[in-house]
Structures are given as structure tokens and as C-alpha cells.
Image: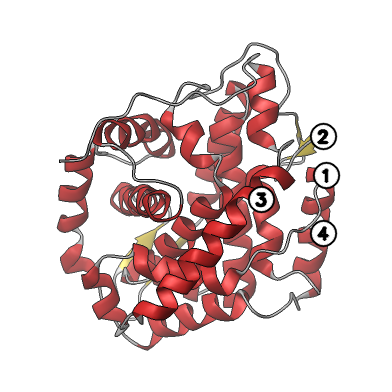
Amino acid sequence: MPPTAATTTLQVLASSSVPTRDHGGNTLDFREPVGDPGWFGPASVTWLVHADLIAMTTGGMAALAWQALHPLILTALWDSADQRDSLRHRIYRTALFIATTTFGPSVAAQAAVDRVRAIHAQVRGITPDGRPYAGDDPHLLTFIHITEVYCCVMAYDTLVRPMSMRERNSYVAETACVALALGAKDVANDWAELLAALQTYGPDMASGTRPLALLRLLHSMTCHPLSHAATDRAMEKLQLALGGQTKDIPMHHVMQAASTVLPDHVLALYGLTLDPQQTAAAKSALRAVVPTMRWALRDGVATQARRRTRVLEPSRPKSDSIP
């Protein structure tokens, strides 16, 4: 069965048993230098959450669908000559960025941020209604960050186990450093601040034919094999560098589960009504895949990073109940 864009991208988050190369062509080895905890370290909630491939993929897809409702972000995606190709590249670049900033050594994490900032500085344009947009707009960067954090928390809650309020607060506070390094401002430092920040972006959201088209594109990418030759080569090169084989993950279930992660007002803008039986089946299917994926990716980037820091088992923070 040929790999889809989404399943091939999954290798980025958790499959790197050999040195790889980043998008700048630089060698990236998650095993070196020994003792370097990177930006977070094995005791962080960020390592715990980002090591779970299924939850991260589900949360990432949900966040992208949410971000597509922001007209400025949507236009930046839409203005690409090939939306499918652009979206595909965005997904796997984001996956590699998350893997590097989470589990990579400190120097590699900073280099990844520097590359993204350089790319953002070149993104400029005008929306159909005449509003300018910029890839390094702090307001947009903050929105992208908080939607990703929210969706990853909700996906982890849904597919792995409920996160305690202490874990949620720690995850928000920890990951803020990446958003700030990218140029975001006024970034939330705990769960309550994040929820409040999300509400302020409500008036910016807009439905329409373009967001719906992008959502259909996301769904199609989970079902159809890669077709663009240049992207084929890029994906194959990335997969080869990461030293992994594409694993069968029911990506149509990921998209169904991603819908349950989104808040009601986002679903309403898309005109989506969830089918309880279908969503329950999707969640069950994904939960069943989690143990297999953990075994298959037992030598992935999280394991490599723990060996770099001489910690062979992930550290789990103390839990408390969510009021």
C-alpha cells in the first residue's frame, strides 16, 4: 500500500535511529552531545506528550483545521501555487521542527527556530479583502502556538489518558519558550491563560468556501497516495534519513478523532456535526494502535534523546485531579 502524505510524515516525530539532516542540510543527531537535555529535558511534560505519536498527529491535524479559519493564515496557505503540495510540506516541516525543538540538543533546537524565522520573514501578501499579512506577525504566531497546544492536550486526554491540571499548566509554560523564540508575544503561561487567549481570537475566525476546501484537502491527504514528484522525492529522502519504515496508521480515524478535539464553535464554523458512533469507533481504533506504535518506534527520537541524557525511561510528573 503506497504511503500517504500523512503517514509518511509520521516518521518525523518518532523515528530516528541514525543521524539525519535538517531542512538546511545540516547533520542532526539526537544522540549527541551526551548530557545535553535540550530545551526541555526528560522530566518535562513536553517530552511526555510529544513522545506519543498518535495523540500528536491527531492534535496537529485538529490545530491545522482550526488555523485555517483565520483569514490571514488561510490566505498564506491558499496563495501557494499548489495547495496540496504546500500543505504537505507544511505538515512534515512542522513535524521535524517539533521533533527537533523537543528532543534535539540545544544547538539544533535553536538552529531549527532560526531557520523557521528566516522562512517566516519572507512570507508576505494581501488577503482578498485587502488586508496585509506577514509570516512573522506576532499575533498570528501566538494563535498558531496556542491552538497547537490546546489540540495536543485534548488529543492526549482523548487517546492516552486525562492530563492533570498541573500537567496542563506545566505543558503550557514549558512550550511557551518555543513560541517566544519564534517571535510570538503575550504567550500564555498556564492553562487558564491559554483558554482566555483563545477566546480573544474568536472574532477573527471566518467560515467560507476556502476553509472548507482546505478541510477537504486535509481529508483527502489521509486517503490518497502522494502524487507530486518533487514532494515524493523530498518525503522519501526525509524518510530514508530518519531511518524508519512507514507504519500503517488509520489516518481516516485520525481525522475523525481530530474533529472531536476541536471546540464546538470551530465545528460550527465548518458546519460539522459529529456522529457519536463513528467518533467512538475512531477513538477505539486509534487507542488500539498506540501500543503497537510505541513498540514500532521504540528506537525513535524520544528514546535517542533519553539515551543522550542517560535517562532510559520517560519521567512522569506527579498528577493531581482536574477540578
Horizontally, residue 154 falls left or right of residue 190, namely right
- Residue 293 is marked as 3
Which class describes the residues within 10 Å of circle 1: few (<14), some (14-19), or many (20+)?
Answer: some
Residue occupying the point 36% across, 35% down: 171
Q: Decide which of 133, 104 is in the foreground and name it.
A: 104
Q: CA distance from mark 1 to mark 3?
A: 16 Å
Q: CA distance from mark 4 to mark 3?
A: 20 Å
Residue occupying the point 40% across, 79% down: 277
- Residue 18 is marked as 2
Q: Are marks 2 and 4 in contact (CB under 8 Å)?
A: no
Q: Are marks 1 and 2 in contact (CB under 8 Å)?
A: yes
Residue occupying the point 51% across, 21% down: 41
- Residue 236 is marked as 4
Q: State which tag comes first along the sequence, 1 or 3.
A: 1
Amino acid type, mark 1: Gly
Which residue does the numbered mark 1 point to in the structure image?
Answer: 243
On screen, 188 above or below 217?
A: above
On screen, 137 above or below 72?
A: above
Q: Which element carries disc 4, helix, strand or loop? A: helix
On screen, 209 above or below 242?
A: below
